[in-house]
Amino acid sequence: MNSKESEYRQLFLLEATENFEELNKQFISLEKKPDDKHAINSIFRIVHTLKGNAMGMGFEAIGNLAHVMEDVMGEIKNGKLDLNSGLFESLFRANDKLGDLIKAIETGKKVSYLGIKTKLEILLKNNREDATGQEEEAEPEVHEAPTEIEADGESSGETDSEADDAQEQEEEDSQQSITFADVIQIPVKKMDELMNLIGQLIIERDRLIAKTSNQNGNRSEFESLQRISSNLQYSIMNARMVQVGFLFNKFHRIVRDAANMEGKRVDLLLKGTEVEIDRNILKIMSDAMIHLARNAVGHGIEGAEVRAQRGKPERGTITMDARYERDNVVIMVSDDGNGIDPSVLRRKVVEKGMMTKDVADSLGDEDIIMQIFEPGFSNADKVTEISGRGVGMDVVKKAVESIGGQVTVDSTPGSGTTVNLHLPSSLALKGALLFEVEEQEYAVALSYTEAVISLKKKDIHKLSTGLMSKYLEETISVVFLGDLIRMQRLSDIQERGILHASFDELPEDASLDVIVVSYGGRLTGLVIDKLLHQQEIMEKGLPRPLEKTKLLSGTTILGNGNVCPVLDVAAVSDLLFRHMAHAKTA
Amino acid sequence: MKLKVLVVDDSAFMRLLLSDILSEDKELEVVGSAADGKEAVTQVMALKPDLVLLDMNMGEYDGLYAVEHIMKKHPVPILILSAVGNTDLEPIFDALRLGAVDYMNKPVRNNSKLRSMDMELIRKIKSAARAKPTIQLPQTKPVATVKLKPRKKRTYDIIVIGASTGGPTAIENVITAFPSNLDVPVLIGQHMPANFIQPFVDRLNKLSPLDVKMGVRGMVPRPGSIIIAPGDRNMVVTCDKSGHLTIDFSDEVFREYNNPSINALMLSVADSYGSKALGAILTGMGKDGVKGLSAIKAKGGHTVAQDKATSVIYGMPKVAYDSGAVSDVLSIKEIGSFLVSKL
């Protein structure tokens, strides 16, 4: 099913379920008071809407049943039909069937509804004949024969062709054949296993190739093995991909509920739903996305009066969009609401004691906006049930970083905010740059690397306890990775000189290899000893008891069998940023 | 310049479905949406769309509310959408009289004809957007102003009327001018979805003292009866074996419009009644009926067309007039009594 279709389906289901709940309510009032005009009108209106929507989806069973109910309600409404207890019973039963049919869209269960539908149809026909009297020239055909057999093809698409109605018409299942769907379901666990195995296979392959080529330099023997195993690997990765629309579609309900709770009117617009991403990544991101959506409703979209003042349409719009960007997928959640005002934020950050006024003032607008992702931050003037107290945004950042992604924010005060989640499209494999520091190999994910440059010692300058340089006219902080790695504790970073150690030992004419990494819009230069090469790696989380280790996100095994730590750019970048902020105030 | 469309429906699902269908077409742009009649009015004022696609059935502030207020505050062409198989079309006819331009069924999907329905919707939107929305004067009680005077010999034996967009209200205007003792049959071809015809017949029956019914094969066009062509076939009159004129249906496919084709109806009338036919072409898009009207005139019958000022869409009457098929051009208010006076 394509994602547009699944969006229609989700939205239809959502509304149909609501319609059904409302129908139940109205039927109960009608039972208490059979001449309740309001209830009669409401039921008429709701089944009418339901019929139209069901027809729009091609859900004929629901459409047809709702149609008959509408006809009956229409006659009752116009006083042409008496709502006696017998008729009420039938309508109520029809309503139950309607509910079952709606549920069956998801469960694919068989629902027999033809009996009650036929009953209402006959009742209607008899009533009309009574009314028009005897004559009438051959009131011809048109209304479909009441006994026809219908299948609810809508129940799932795959399990179609169940005709129904056990009670009355045992229908001719004589030449029933078994059909196989073109789709099979595979438990995620099995896919994870496959992924794991192919990862090991690739490592083993690379080890073998490295060893052989060391011995006799002949790599061509391995070419087809390399190609086939790479293809296998991509096929498996591909099989794990799902369309982001699958997740996006769930947000119709979430946004709607949040908007109701806040008393706001909000539309959800979905774009780029066909973009594909690893299923596990989507799962990891789902909670973060919920936070973002609720936050957009709660803090982003303004109340009706403010929107009117600003000349915006009455209904706010939240847009979810996805696109490919190099190897990554970028998911955007934007609203056309308040936007974030950096000057307000600056004040709040200081009020909350997150940093001193001097530091806050020295930070650029972008850096200030990133503070919303710090734990415990809340920008809302009032605390609501939906968007809480600013827990949430730090959850977003943690979730994104846990899979090696990045968050960025674009915001224009008064006109809206966009949160961009830059995510790897696949968890299992990523491009990485390998380098050496103090004779140990390290890897850094390509998704974080901006450039590899060469700097002279004289290009680098001491600034307080840290180092700075220029890259493309921009001032970037520079760090010798060796200095970081040698630290005993992270707090040592504040010790004067610790980040200057390698720098001070260098000869004046030294030339340095620097990897420029980018995180959260900040560029950092990492000075390394030796650049090795680029390669696809499969990163594994750090084993216990090392999993708490800062600055490393995991490890990978290289072709030569060596274990290679993977640098956590987010952590390094944050550490340096905090250090610089601290240093400025000291 | 794209045509700016406002989509109004209380169901978010329907709004999405409609918006998606419309955005398939490069000339259309959905500029906004509204969930009820009241919001629709606000959105029309704010967005100034070229056309409003309007659902009727919407709770407290329904489509009728929207039509009434939009026409008062900022008249734009309104296209009414209604779910198929509607039993109660009165509100739609009311909406048409209040100034809505046209109406059609909501999109229905089944495996076969998804695309064609979408194209139909887009086509209707484009043609309706060109109409000038006007409030059709509220109908006073259906009383024919002229009574038919007894006379020696009738000049004409039948009246045949064809209409498309804007037609339902125009036809109401015409037939309410017919007296209760009308002594010729009236045949009407109105372009309209099949399921709308019966309710339309019911409505006309309430407005007119004459007997209005939908055409069935073998029916005899009796004096004083008004026969409306069904919407799923091309209705014609033919001579049966015994030499009586009866209603029949033609398999012939017409290029301009089918089910019902006004050409089919009028050509058969020209054949069967010769110089004894009175033909009228009313408001509508396209040029269906022009050939038929020409044939009536060629056989010596008399023909009229609705004028530009009162036509919701001055299409068919214009082509008919330009091709010389029209004897008299009249405002919608005059046509009914004019036809009666000609008899």
Image (cartoon, coloured by chain):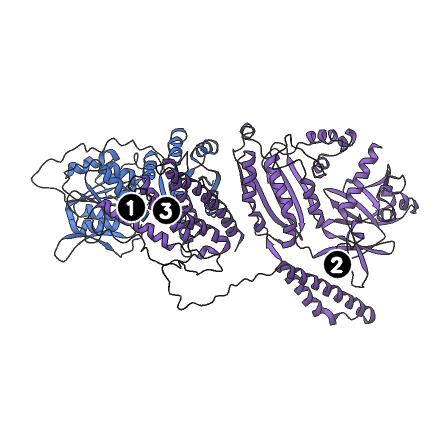
Chain colours: A purple, B blue
Q: Secondary structure at mark 3?
A: helix
Q: Can you say whether A388 is above or below B196 in the image?
A: above
Q: Judge left or right: residue B143 versus residue A230.
A: left
- The residue beneath circle 2 is A535
Residue B289 is at least partly visible in this image: no
Q: Is residue B137 magenta?
A: yes
The CA span between labels 2 and 3 is 71 Å
Q: Secondary structure at mark 1?
A: helix
Q: Chain of mark 3?
A: A
Inspect the image, locate mark 1, and give the three-letter code of the amino acid beneath it: Ile
**Are the two marked residues, 1 and 2, in contact with CB atoms closer than 8 angstroms?**
no
Inspect the image, locate mark 3, and give the three-letter code of the amino acid beneath it: Glu
Please name which of the two marks, 2 or 3, marks the residue nearer to the observer: 3
The CA span between labels 3 and 1 is 33 Å
Instruction: Say few, some or many: other residues with alpha carbon within 10 Å of mark 2 (under 14 / 14 to 19 / 20 or more).
Output: some
Please name which of the two marks, 3 or 1, marks the residue nearer to the observer: 3
Which of the marked residues, 2 or 3, is nearer the chain's N terminus? 3
Question: Nearest the camera: A161 or B73?
Answer: A161
Instruction: Say few, some or many: other residues with alpha carbon within 10 Å of mark 3 (under 14 / 14 to 19 / 20 or more).
Output: few
- The residue beneath circle 3 is A89
Residue B163, image x and y in percent? 28, 43
Question: Nearest the camera: B106 or A222?
Answer: B106
Q: Judge left or right: residue B279 versus residue A352.
A: left
Residue furthest left as drawn? B152
Badge number at residue B197: 1
Inspect the image, locate mark 2, and give the three-letter code of the amino acid beneath it: Gln
Q: Which residues are magenta?
A: B133-155
The CA span between labels 1 and 2 is 71 Å
